[in-house]
Each structure stands twice: as C-alpha cells, then as structure tokens.
Image: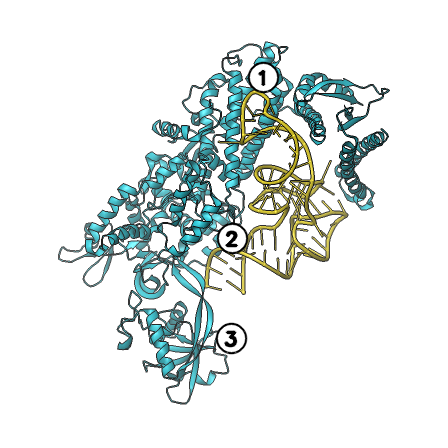
Chain colours: A cyan, B yellow
Amino acid sequence: MEKTFNPSQIEKACYQHWESQGMFRPSGQGEPYCILLPPPNVTGSLHMGHAFQHTIMDALIRYHRMKGDNTLWQCGTDHAGIATQMVVERQLNAQQLTRHDLGREKFIERIWEWKQESGGNITQQMRRLGTSPDWDREVFTMDDNLSNAVQEVFIQLYDEGLIYRGKRLVNWDPALLTAVSDLEVVNEEEDGFMWHVRYPLADGSGHIEVATTRPETMLGDTAVAVHPEDERYSALVGKTIRLPITGREIPIIADDYVDPEFGTGCVKITPAHDFNDYDMGKRHNLPMINVLTNEAKINQNAPEEFQGLDRFEARKKIVERLEAEGFLVNINPHKLKVPRGDRSGVVIEPYLTDQWYVAVETLAKPAIDAVESGEIRFVPENWSKTYFQWMNNIQDWCISRQLWWGHRIPAFYDENGQVYVGKDEASVREKHNLSDQVILKQDDDVLDTWFSSALWPFATMGWPEQTPELDTFVPSSVLVTGFDIIFFWVARMIMMTKKFTGKIPFKDIYITGLIRDENGDKMSKSKGNVLDPIDLIDGIELEALVQKRTSGMMQPQFAAKIEKATRKQFAEGINAYGTDALRFTFAALASNNRDINFSMNRVEGYRNFCNKIWNASRFVLMNCEEHDTGRDGGELQLSIFDKWIWSRFQDTLATFEKHLADYRFDLAAQSLYEFTWNQFCDWYLELSKPVLNSEQSSDAEKRGTRHTLINVLEHLMRLLHPFMPYITDEIWKRVQPLSACKDDLSSIMLASFPQVEASKIDLASEQVIEWVKTFIIGVRNIRGEMDIAPSKKLQVLLKNASEQDKVWLDETLGFLQNLAKLEDISLLESDQEAPASATTLVGEMELMIPMAGLIDKDAELKRLTRNIEKLEKDMQRVQGKLNNQNFVAKAPEDVIQKEREKLQDFESQFAKISEQIEKIKNI
RNA sequence: GGACGCAUAGCUCAGUUGGGAGAGCACCGCCCUUACAAGGCGGGGGUCGCAAGUUCAAGCCUUGCUGCGUCCA
C-alpha cells in the first residue's frame, strides 16, 4: 500500500464494479427499506445541498442494505417545466431564434434532444459521490408510465370535481408569460414610494385623498373604499368619484378590510390587479377592468395615450399627468413587499385569466391527520408545526402553466368552449358520444411540474397498475429533504398518495439543514461563494475556480469582487479531498441545526481522518500479511487489550446505531471518529506493538493480537462503510482474506453490517485500560511539562500501591514501560523514603519520577501548584454542596453519596499533592 | 402583524430523563519514535447573550429583554 491515501486512484473503478455487478438492486429478501430520491431537475448540476442530502440517503441505504433489508433507493429526474424550457430557449436565442420560430412540436423535440445529450449530467455526478440508487429503476417524470399516471390522476380528480377550471386572479409572470403558483412567488421588501392622490367627488363638492404604491393601476380603479366606522369619511360613503385622467365615475364604498390607520384611510380599489381588491370587488359586485396585456403593458381598456406602454413607463406618465393636473398631493418613500417570480425575477402581476385548479381542502384533511396521528413523523419534530400552519390555511392550487414543456392538460374543447376531460381525443369522443363532426382542440397548457412530483411515491412504483412494488415500497421508509420544499412537494405527496393509494407515502420525514458557506451566507452564483462538490472531490486550480465563479453571471458587475475574494480564500486552489472525506464531512455536519455552515477546515480534517484509516490499515496489514492471524485455527491468547478493544467496538457500534436511528448523523460520525482515532489508533495499535515486537511473546499471544488487529479492522471497515464507501471497500478487499470473515464477496457492500456481540462487552478490561491510560498519561504529562526528551528513558517509583494496583502492574508492566518509555518501575514499601520526585496520582497510588538531574524544582512546584489550585476549586464546590442542609435533606441519596465520594477523592489527592509540594520546597 | 429558530472556547459546533462545561480547527511547547509530519506527545483557553423565577441543584425548565435569522400574511 502507498504511504498516503490517494482517493482518485480507487474511486472510479470501485464504483464501476458496484454498478456493473448490480449491487444497487433490492435483494428481494428481508424487511423492505425504501428511500425516494427527491428527483433533481434534469437541467441541474449537483450542488452542495444535493451532495449533503445524497450522502445522508446513501448512508442510510448502505446501512440498511448491509443489515439485510430489502433495500430500494428509487431515483429519477424531474422535467422541471420552466427551468428546462428556459435552458433550451436560451440556446435558441443564441441562434437568433425563438421557440415560436420552431413551433410547439419542433421545440419539444429540441428539448428531448437536449435531454438526451445533457440530461444525465447530474446522475453522473451522483455516481462520483458514490451513491447507490437502483439505476435500473431510474425514471424521468415525462416518461410514458409517469405521464400516464399524471393523466389518470388528473382525470379522476376532475371527475370527482376536485379539479376545476375558472377565471380568477392568478400570479402572472409577464416575462415567462405563464401563471405561477403562490409558492413560486417570492415577496421581498424593496424601496418604493407611496403616492398620495386627490380624487375629486363627482358632484364637485370636494375631494378624497387616496394613497397608493401603484398609481398606474388607477386606470382600472372601480371604487374607493374607506372603513365603515371611519368618521372622517362616513358622510362620503355612497357618493361617487370622478377618476382623474379617465373621467370614469366610481363609487365610494365602505369595507372593514380598510385599515383607517394606514395612509389616508382611503384605498383605491382595482379588482383586476390586486388580490385584496379582487376579494373586495366580489363582495361589492364591482366591475373588473383589466388594463394590462399579458406582457404587463397597458391595454385597450385604458386611454389611448397610455396604450402599449410598459407598466413602469405608464406609472411615470400617469404620475406626471396627475401632477400637471394638480391631483398629486405628495410622494413619500415607502418600503413595500414586491412579488417576484422565483425563476424570472420580474415583478409578478395579479392577472385575470382562465386556469386549472386543484380544490385541495378535501385532500388536505387526511394529509393533516396522517401527521397529527403520528403515522408520519417529522424529524426534527418541530417542522410539523410549519406543515400544519400551511395545511390549515391551504389555498386552491393553480396547476396550469402556459408553457410547452410538460404534461399537457388532458382536456379538450369543442367549438362552443365545452370542456371534455379524457386521456386522448378518441376516448373523449367515446365517453361523451361525440361524433366526428365535432371539432375538438386540446388545451394548450401544461401542468405545474410539481403536479407530477406529487405522484412520485406511487407513480414510480408502477401505479396505476397494481404492481408488487406498490405493496412492498409504499410507504417508503424515510424522506430526506430540505424545509424549502415542504409545501411544494412534501405536503402534496402526502395528499396525493393518501388519495390514490390510501397509504402514506413515507413514515419519517427527515428535514435536513441548509448548507451555507463558512460565514453563514447562502451559497449563490451572484455572491460568488458557491462550492462545487466535485471540485472538493477532485480538487481544482485557482484559475479554473475563478473562471467558474465569474463566468455566466447575471450581475457581471460583481465579478471583480468575487475574483478577489476567491483568490484570497483559495490562494492555492482547492485540494483533492476525495469522496469519502467529503461524505464524512457532510455526515459530521448534519446536526439538528437549521443552518449548516460548511467549512473547508472540516473537510481537511476528515481527509486527514481518511489518511489515518489508510495508514492504520497499512500497519495492520504489514503485521498480518504473511503472518498467522489465526484465521484457520491455532491457539489464540487474547490479551486484556484485545478484550478491551473488542469491548469498545461493541459500545461504538451500539452508539452509532442509536444515533443513526435518531437521524443524528453528526453524533454517529463523531462516535466513529473517536473510536477509530482515539481508541483504535492511539491506544490499541500502540499496545499491539510490544506484543508483536517482543521476542518474549508466545506464538499464541502474537496470533491473538494479530487476530484482533485484523478482525477489529475488518469489522471497523464494515462499520464505516455507509459513510465512507470507497476507502472501506479498498481496504476491506485486502483485510477480509486475512480475517475470520469467510464470505467470499467482491465488495464490502455485500457484507453484513456488524452486530453487537454482548459476549464481547468486557467492563473489567475497560477498568484496567483506564488505569493503564492514567498511568501512561501521568508520565507523559510530567515528561511534556518538564521538557524531558521523549528519547530519555525514565525511572518510575510507585508508592502506596494497592493489591489491585500490583495485580494490574504485573499484568501490564511491559506495556507501561513501552508506551511511557520507562527504564524500569519499582515499588516503594510504605516505610521506604522516596527521593525528591515529580509526582502524579493513579487513583490512590503515587507515581514518582526522581528529579535528580532531570527536573527543575521550580517548574515542578509550578505544575503541582496548578494542580492543587484546580483541586481546591473542586473541593470548595463539593463541600459547599454537602454543607448545604437543603441539599443533604432533599437531593436523592445516590447523588449525595456520589458527592461524598468525590470529596473524599479530592481530599486524598489534595493531601498527597500538598505533602509533595512541602517536600519539594524543602529540597 | 403571526409562527418558528439561533445565541456555549479565537472560529465552527455538540451537550435528549436538571446533579463534576466537551469535540474539531486555530493557538503554545517538545518530537522526523520502524502505520501515519495529512503525524505523535503534552498544554493554555469559557460569569454557557442579559435579567428574573422554579429547584437542594439550571447551559438544560418558565417568563421577560436584547441581538441575529427564516417562513407565512
């Protein structure tokens, strides 16, 4: 083996082997365990959030697969309506073409071609991450079988009256020329203005002052509203206003929606261009005047001079006119929430159009119950509140989109506009007895992408066919996803799956944190702080990184700043850390926190961890290859240390599994790290050396130690495998043939997960090791603090050794000498006078290192004084407690007893160290 | 306006029946010791945001305040 772990050398071949051998397929045996991959957009590339969530899913999948479950990771990609259409449109634009030049059919063909070429990008990147979904079952949301399910669901919901078509105010994206759902609109506070405008009364008796943030919509005003109890205006209610510019007469109405405190207390009402005004318009039977085109330009319903003007241009013109004609009172700066399309970034218009809706209320009920009853569990539990809050106020879902790419709505119209819903024209004709004379035209719109995503849990399992997978893998075990799509996706899957299968889609919902950069900022192209997971795996040169971060930007003005920051942070580029280090980092960061700050330091630390594992394995193999490891029999004599490391392993394994069951990947990772580095490497490997290197060790002892080395390592690789698939497979291939594991498998993936063996839990050995550690650390502490060279062998005297101490000493003498680098160890009888020594305590026993020629008196005094000051503090605290009558009277007996023992221990230590200090002072 | 979250070592974060404050990184000292300098050994560092309350006992429970953040209207 090479001296340094080199991930790039092993990863690709390893993955190809797994995939080509079909190791990702469900075994067909055991308990079903299933995870649904949130289908990434085909247009997407793997970002840190994906990599994080995929790591977690893969760890769970690998763990359960090794546990012997019938494990399926169902994967696939999403057609991502708007996003995909935009990508291909942009390509056309580059050739001076629009999608209209091609026509619908050709354009869709073009998208399929694009998908054929570039759609596999993200799934290739997933492979780099070592993920193990069943690629044979990969689906695309536009595949025939999924499209079929979409139609089926649409038709059934329509037949039940749960899908309807209606003219309503929707969120209209004037750039993309489509309706979007509430969820696709982001409201952000922006600086704007509040215009105060005088509206004259029609009878000439005065005026009323309204305040508005959107003066241009006055062209569509159909009323002015005041609060019914607002005494300032009560006399005016019922009168009419002559609208400036248009001269139209509109009523003054009273409605308690109006906030008398806000602005002037008078609100202009534009039912066709504002959601609240729309509701009020309905309540008061106001006419709705639409003054905008679908591109948000002023339309024919407005005075000619404004027609064709963009909404913002029109705003300027109208304000000018109002001012010129003396209607404008003033303009105040004003912060307001501006709705923008999450894809296009342009201001969304409330716009009157015909759209399709899902009536969600009846679907929501069972979906709420499923979480309330605990049948579905959110982890962390708190997210259920967010879920309930939304579900209890859920609005009908606008599902039609004026796009070309997507599932076309299975609805047909005759020449009278009569709607027929059905799979295709033929079935519609048959169902409704329509003759060939009737001309039918299919609806031009497609469905919201999330409509098909909502069917993911059962459509991917073959629904509407009654397949075995539907029985086995619905519900799936856990959904791993971010809180940002609880509404978009999670809630809708629960509704649809309940509705169409009667089952819940998943039992647990593990909501992960959001990956941010190390300063806690969201990673975004415009901030230039994006990290590509693949770059962390393979490494990247500085120049390439700068290039990547500054090209293709929406706001090129930030490029210089980003370049500077990038050059500063990554002066040497990014190292190749490898997949395992990256995965382990994600696992270790996966606490219950909502925000997870990614840190390069952590990746580096876990890259070092990989290297540690690699080198520990080298050590084990060097000592076991070509040697007798007891694989085929032979007497094994296990040392106390062999028993101890096995015992620690059981504990680590149990802890790991507990944390995994709680979705605490951070704690699970920590337990692995701690065992591997701080127990196995730091202590066990060191303790094995005296046995292996000593000529006095018997064959049975050596065999026992080698047996332990190779088999603990073999178990450890299986334990680590779900988090670190590559390095463990590579090492396991070499280790397994020397170990007691006789399964002839071509990959650790197929091996079974270790099981806790109660018989190997050995508390007695753990006690001995604690004693040994205290002993050795005590010597090292003196050595370190007294600046004694490691090469200098020391002499140790032991005073006040108990019978137990003597037994343990006898058992571990050689190890103590070896690890603490001791010349020799001798026992002082109680009546023997000790020479001036540096002292440390091992329980009641005093461990002394004669100072002569080695240790400076003042330095030792300083060290002891520091110790005793700490002890004093501890004693004071405990004494304070025990002197408190209330504590003694009310605290549980075992707590009191513990405190008493502590005090005794402290006092004994205090006495010994004080004595020592006196002694040294007197030298 | 409503809901939720966060505040612990210089930094990033653990701390789940309330009972002696932890890890990683960074920092300081010694060491190229035959698995590993991407390493070993030792060490320093915290009035757990502030205030009050409950309790024998509070980082942990309750209330209020301050600061930051997210979502919904």
Q: Secondary structure at mark 2?
A: helix
Mark 2 lies on residue? A385
- Residue A705 got which mark? 1
Give the residue drawn at x 44%, y 34%: A578
Mark positioned earlier in the residue sequence (1 or 3) = 3
* Residue neighbourhood size for the residue with mark 2, other residues' Cα within 10 Å, grouped as few (<14), some (14–19), many (≥20): few
Relative depth, front residue between A320 and B4: A320
* Residue neighbourhood size for the residue with mark 3, other residues' Cα within 10 Å, grouped as few (<14), some (14–19), many (≥20): few
Q: Nearer the viewer, mark 1 or mark 3?
A: 1
- Amino acid carrying label 2: it is Lys
- Residue A304 got which mark? none
Give the residue drawn at x 36%, y 43%: A458
Q: Nearer the viewer, mark 2 or mark 1?
A: 1
Residue A537 lies in what quarter of the image?
top left
Q: Is residue A667 left or right of residue A921?
A: left
Q: Nearer the viewer, mark 3 or mark 2?
A: 3
- Amino acid carrying label 1: it is Thr
Using the rendered image of the protein, determine whether residue A837 is visible from the camera's viewpoint.
yes
Q: Are marks 2 and 1 on the same chain?
A: yes
Mark 3 lies on residue? A261
Q: Is residue B26 left or right of residue A259?
A: right
Residue at the extreme front: A853
- Of the 4 image quadrants, the one containing the C terminus of chain A is top right
List x then y, in percent, for residue A742: 46, 17
Mark positioned earlier in the residue sequence (3 or 2) = 3
State how far apart marks 3 and 2 are (Cα).
Answer: 32 Å
Q: Secondary structure at mark 3?
A: loop
Relative depth, front residue between A650 and A44: A44
- The subunit carrying tag 1 is A
State how far apart marks 1 and 3 are (Cα).
Answer: 82 Å
- Amino acid carrying label 3: it is Glu
Q: Is residue A382 left or right of residue A113?
A: right
